[in-house]
Image (tube, rainbow, N blue to C red):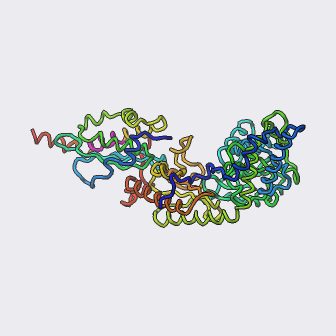
């Protein structure tokens, strides 16, 4: 049976709002519309109670000791900006060196580039062929001037999960603030800021079946107390770290989404792992010279990233785009017209970065959808290989790497 | 990015996909682009050495949908032209026909390069044979 089309398999970009989340949000648009900072009337109290509850729900999901440690922002990008710039400004007297990785998402890398222009020094630690960061490489990058270590929890393209607890221990040992961009990990796999020694954590609602437009930054208050300079000044909301009226309906939705993730995670992660493995097996068993990107085990349950030799990623997506929404690391699908820097960082041939396809399963993905997408992807790749001069040459035994290419 | 109907048509029903057998008389091959850039086009013309007419053309392309469409369109346009006429195909003609957006103009440039490379290869391999054929015919 053909499932309802098109099928959404791009859940690392965003997720649909869970209907239960929407139900929780609706009253806060119309009836409970007060300003949470209005301290002197019931409208304000009601809105503030909604915010408090949301903060508790998110705190529980990430293992925060105190809901007050959560600062609402507009999303992951703002959280990352606030964490990195906030620490850089606050701890400037102490040092000017930051350690991060080459595979952070654009927000992390772009903030670091800006800080470099402002006189900070940034070390971008490389990753292995499996996408993992070596904790010892971080250790050896540290200097007496290092004020911040920022390593993403799980990668948005390849899903590789980093050794966050080990990095947390290292940071604690050295007395350096540790931030993790956990936008892809929170709600999908266990995250515990206390057990993992995380000082700052960025997360966002729309990747956990919550609304777009709200995220949070966890800022540790104890052991150690971390201080950050605000980026937005104003009424002193969010304990002075992020002024501006908090969008209460969105925050309430974020909270409910976090609560649902916490309840559903054991079952959901198992189900998605099984479906993801099914998708992976169906594709890899039918397509030769297809390579899994990222670590085969230490990976988000819903994430699958494969490079298909001899075919370009956008052309694969184009073959499927009426039926399935996927993503590619191909240059033609990026705003920068460069192939994926994450896949390139794995040390694979540049051609394979252009040839990578990312599948993202989610709460509402069915087995029928997985089977359908697997079959259609295999067909599209086979069709494009028949059209590919590289495939033809490889079949003829020509070594593509020894060719002299007349590039533009 | 939404694709134009013509790009979708050429991508879904590419014209003249394939290769000529090795040593086929009158064949010129152009191979341009590079795998690490995400675009490689192989374009072949089969010229009647006596008339100078391109009787057939084939392509294979590794690249995005617009690159596939550009090379597919190029093979369509090449068939039936003389070698001299073929040299006049410009990338802007392809851009206009396929309504390529600015970010895809390089696909049309690559197709023009492929045409030129195929014509050059034909001349290098078959110019003497063509000259002989014409002398013989007259």
Q: Which residues are magenta?
A: B114-123
Q: How many marks?
A: 0
The residue most toward the front is A31
**Residue B35 spot, x, y in % from top left:** 46, 50
- Is residue A36 shown left or right of residue A399? right
Q: Up-down: is A4 above or below A273?
A: above
Q: What is the magenta segment's predominant secondary structure?
A: helix
Magenta-colored stretch includes residue B133 = no
Q: Say whether residue A93 is left or right of residue A106.
A: right
Position of residue A107 in the picture relative to residue B84 (left or right) = right
Residue B57 x/y as whole percent: 28, 46
Q: In terms of depth relative to the viewer, which is nearer, A185 or A227?
A: A185
> For residue A43, what is the image quadrant?
top right
Q: Nearer the viewer, residue A77 or A163?
A: A77
**Which residue appears farthest toward the left when viewing the image?**
B138
Q: Nearer the viewer, residue A294 or A71?
A: A71
Report the residue at 71% width, 39% height from top: A116
Tell me the quarter of the image containing the C terminus of chain A: top left
Residue A40 or B87: which is nearer the viewer? A40
Residue A79 visible (yes or no): no
Instruction: Note whether A404 is above or below A241 in the view shown.
Output: below
- The answer to which image quadrant residue A31 occupies is top right
């Amino acid at each position: 049976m053909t499932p309802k089309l098109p099928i959404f398999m791009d859940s690392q970009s965003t997720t649909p709002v869970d209907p239960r989340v929407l139900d929780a949000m609706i009253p806060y648009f119309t009836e409970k519309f007060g300003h949470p900072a209005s301290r002197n009337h019931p409208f304000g109290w009601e809105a503030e109670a909604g915010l408090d509850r949301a903060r508790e729900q998110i705190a529980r999901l990430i293992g925060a000791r105190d809901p007050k440690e959560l600062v609402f922002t507009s999303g992951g990008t703002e959280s990352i900006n606030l964490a990195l710039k906030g620490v850089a400004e606050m701890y400037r007297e102490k040092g000017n060196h930051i350690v991060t990785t080459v595979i952070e998402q654009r927000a992390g890398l772009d903030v670091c580039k800006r800080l470099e222009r402002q006189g900070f020094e940034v070390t971008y630690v490389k990753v292995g062929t499996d996408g993992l960061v070596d904790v010892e490489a971080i250790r050896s990058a540290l200097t007496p001037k290092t004020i911040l270590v920022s390593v993403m929890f799980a990668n948005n393209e390849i899903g590789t999960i980093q050794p966050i607890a080990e990095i947390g221990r290292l940071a604690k040992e050295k007395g350096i603030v540790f931030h993790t961009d956990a936008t892809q990990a929170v709600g999908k796999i266990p995250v515990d800021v206390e057990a993992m020694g995380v000082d700052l954590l960025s997360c966002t609602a729309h990747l956990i079946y919550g609304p777009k437009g709200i995220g949070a930054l966890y800022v540790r208050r104890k052991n150690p107390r971390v201080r950050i300079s605000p980026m937005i000044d104003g009424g002193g909301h969010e304990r002075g770290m992020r002024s501006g009226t908090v969008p209460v309906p969105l925050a309430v939705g974020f909270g409910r989404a976090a609560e649902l993730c916490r309840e559903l995670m054991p079952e959901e992660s198992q189900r998605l792992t099984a479906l993801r493995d099914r998708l992976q097996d169906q594709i890899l068993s039918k397509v030769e010279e297809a390579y899994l990107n990222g670590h085969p085990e230490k990976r988000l349950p819903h994430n699958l990233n494969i490079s298909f030799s001899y075919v370009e990623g956008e052309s694969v997506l184009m073959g499927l785009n009426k039926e399935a929404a996927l993503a590619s690391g191909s240059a033609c699908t990026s705003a920068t017209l460069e192939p994926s820097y994450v896949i390139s960082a794995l040390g694979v041939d540049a051609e394979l970065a252009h040839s990578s396809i990312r599948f993202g399963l989610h709460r509402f993905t069915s087995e029928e959808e997985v089977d359908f997408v697997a079959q259609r992807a295999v067909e599209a790749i086979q069709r494009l290989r028949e059209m590919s001069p590289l495939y033809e040459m490889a079949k003829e035994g020509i070594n593509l790497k020894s060719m002299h290419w007349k590039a533009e | 990015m939404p694709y134009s109907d013509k790009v979708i048509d050429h991508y879904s029903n590419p014209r003249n996909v394939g290769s000529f057998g090795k040593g086929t008389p009158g064949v010129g091959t152009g191979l341009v682009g590079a795998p690490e850039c995400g675009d490689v086009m192989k374009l072949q013309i089969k010229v009647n050495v006596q008339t100078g007419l391109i009787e057939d053309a084939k392509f294979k392309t590794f690249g995005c949908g617009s690159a596939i469409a550009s090379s597919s369109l190029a093979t369509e346009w090449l068939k039936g032209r003389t070698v001299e006429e073929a040299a006049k195909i410009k990338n802007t003609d392809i851009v206009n026909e396929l309504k390529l957006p600015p970010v895809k103009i390089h696909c049309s440039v690559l197709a023009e390069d492929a045409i030129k490379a195929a014509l050059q290869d034909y001349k290098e391999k078959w110019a003497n044979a063509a000259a002989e054929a014409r002398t013989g015919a007259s």
